[in-house]
Amino acid sequence: MSLIPATILTGFLGAGKTTLLNRILQEPHGFKIAVIENEFGQENIDHEILVHDDNEQIVEMNNGCICCTVRGDLIAALSTLARRRNNGELDFDHVVIETTGLANPGPVTQTFFIDEEVATHYLVDAVITVVDARHAMHQLDKFEEAQRQVGFADKLLLSKTDLVDADTLTALTDRLRRINPRAAIATTHFGQVPIAAVMDLRGFNLNDKLDIDRAFTEEDEHVHDAHCGHDGHLHEHHHGRHSDNIAAFVFRSDRPFRADKLDEFLGALVQVHGPQMLRYKGVLWMEGADRKVIFQGVHQILGTDMGAKWGENEARASKIVFIGQNLPKDTFLLGLQQCLV
């Protein structure tokens, strides 16, 4: 039986998550969606707001935040849904998990990898973060949770863009791309968004697509060139930007990795810095390999997969994106360089 795709919907307080979810549930898209939603407090107001029909089964967890204090309830809810689906009691083909506005998406995402029963039935389709264009700058300045939500995203949906001017929107978009250059950015107006923009994105899957806007990463990336004659170049430019705790940097190399050295170094990184490593993903050129190696991770959980064969005329190179909290960039980049052939 094929795995059930799960969308993790996150975003800061008031960003418009429930409005978006309500639109998804009303749109005649043909999906049968099971929703797991949660708010602080004993009374779940969202349950009254959401539109119900025969295709949606809503599982409520009223005893805290699903991403931390009641993570066990998330596992129980997902397992119960899967068992009832297998028994023919429920009919759904997609799960949407709406987190609270103060949620850290990391533990929610990790649930799909560390719990055997959950991993047997589900896969993470994408982490979608709704960003309030009117208040996001202040929220990113003040709340680490807001930065984490952006850092974990596979896709960012900007809401309330009609309430800000073009310059403000451009500044926010630039900042979001610096925090997370791998996430696509789109806009939503009162939750209106094509279903194809939020469902079946496969944004979290292992693949060899690593779309990075270099305009927002080249300032901070460490480029290793076999012909440069020294250890590489580290470019630092300051344009009066915000100093976010959550930030991204990129490693690139046109030399292959030694598998033994890279395994040892990545293992050490994850052990020491795993809690601060929100998302990381790369396409690797390994010594002696005729196929690309794809790897990605969430915190301490790292996975690899074999990618496509290198093309006959394709320039072989490695590219890795790290998104994390106060990561020692130089340590990462110099350590990776020492793993090269």
Image (spheres, rainbow, N blue to C red):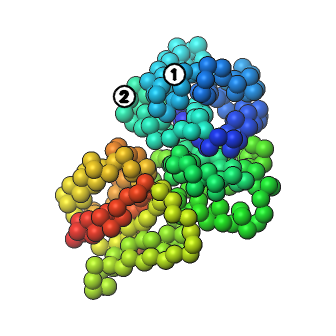
Q: Residue at x 77, y 32 (%)?
A: 26
Q: Residue furthest front?
A: 142
Indicate which label's residue lies in the foreground, 2 or 1: 1
Which percent across, then down, holds residue 151? 51, 52
Q: Which residue is mark 1?
A: 77
Split into 4 quadrants, where in the image is the C terminus? Answer: bottom left
Residue closer to the observer: 207 or 192: 192
Q: Residue furthest right?
A: 162
Q: Residue at x 76, y 51 (%)?
A: 160
- Inspect this view and state whether residue 202 appears: no
Q: Secondary structure at mark 2?
A: helix
Which percent across, then down, holds residue 243? 51, 63
Which percent across, then down, holds residue 206? 43, 49
The amino acid type, in three-letter code, at marker 1 is: Ala
Q: Secondary structure at mark 1?
A: helix
Q: Residue at x 64, y 54 (%)?
A: 138
Q: Which residue is mark 2?
A: 116
Labels 2 and 1: the sequence-earlier one: 1
The amino acid type, in three-letter code, at marker 2 is: Glu
Quote the CA–CA distance across marks 2 and 1: 14 Å
Residue 199 as seen in the image, left or right of residue 280:
right
